[in-house]
Image: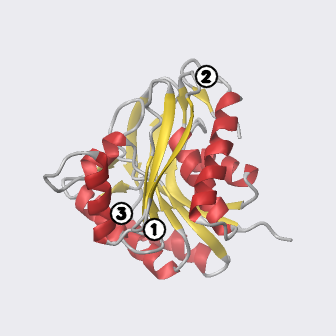
Amino acid sequence: MLRPIILSIAGSDPCGGAGVQADARMIWACGGRPATVIATLTAQNSQRFVGSYPVSVDVLSAQLHAVMEDLPVAAIKVGALGNAENVRLVANFCKEAHVPCVVDPVLNATLGGALCEGDDVVQAYYEFANEHVVITPNGDELAQLNRHSRRGDRPVAQALLHQGFGAILHTGGDGQELCVDTLYTRDSQEHFSSKRIQGDIHGTGCVFSSAIATYLGMNMPLRDAVEQAKQAVNHAMMYAVKIGHGRAQVEP
């Protein structure tokens, strides 16, 4: 039986710790077959982030259409896109694809520096809103996506659901002792907890969203996909390797 094809639309990390390189490793480890489209080039390594250089919308569009006209994509993961113009293009593409889509709204690099620039970039992310999309912001990203005056994670997540997103997964990897991820849907709210794995590790957000997309591409229910993905990421973090002079990389 062929592995389901999971398309990662994200940035390229030349050292492989994050972006499409990390996505591809995790997709394969979870049982999928990766296809990749580069939305932005980055200059970074395990110690520092230099800059992000978005590809043009024409180049991005050409890559997307080349993949979709040939491959039966089962699910899509979206990572760093570079600018608001690319965000809008990919949002429209995902609506037309009619497959599960997991959007990691990567606005800033872990090591510092903007991965998606422009005054209207937050507004552009709202164009992803449709029933097929799960968006996976961390605490900082959830706050940045909040264009309403209400405060607190639950009201912000509910506001995003009202915009039309299928589900919101607030990732809580910044907890001190426990990592608690909260899944919000129109009908429920559920917490997924695990003991915090110590270490300075790069790429966890990338591989978490990739794993969820892979399991959704296998027709797994969302709750089960999140639970399985969390286990896969914890395993990858336990075996993280330090190949440079800075942060370790997850090892799916």
Task: Give residue 199's position: percent from left, percent from top.
Answer: 56, 21
In the image, what residue occupies the spot 50% across and 24% down? 177
Marker disc for residue 11: none
Most foreground residue, 188 or 123: 188
Disc 3/disc 1 C-alpha distance (Å): 14 Å
Q: Which sits in the foreground, 102 or 241?
A: 102
Q: Which residue is mark 2?
A: 244
| SS for callout 1 | strand
Q: Residue at x 31, y 51 (%)?
A: 154
Foreground label between 2 and 1: 1
As drawn, which residue projects farthest toward the right?
Answer: 1
Q: Looking at the picture, does residue 79 appear above or below residue 234?
A: below
Pick the quarter of the image with the C terminus: top right
Q: Secondary structure at mark 2?
A: loop
Q: Which of marks 1 and 2 precedes in the sequence?
A: 1
User: Percent x, y for residue 15?
Assistant: 59, 35
Q: Residue at x 69, y 47 (%)?
A: 25
Residue 122 sits above or below residue 60 on the image? above
Mark 2 or mark 3: which comes first in sequence? 3
Residue 133's mark? 1
Quarter where residue 152 is shown: top left
- The residue that label 3 is drawn on is 87
> The residue under label 3 is which amino acid type?
Val
Q: Where on the picture, by quarter, is residue 93?
A: bottom left
- For the N terminus, the quadrant is bottom right
Q: Is residue 125 visible?
A: no
- The single residue placed furthest to the left in the displayed view is 149
Labels 2 and 1 touching (C-beta < 8 A): no
Callout 1 crowding tier (Cα within 10 Å): few <14, some 14–19, many ≥20? many
Name the element at disc 3: helix
Residue 55 picture location, percent across and down: 42, 58
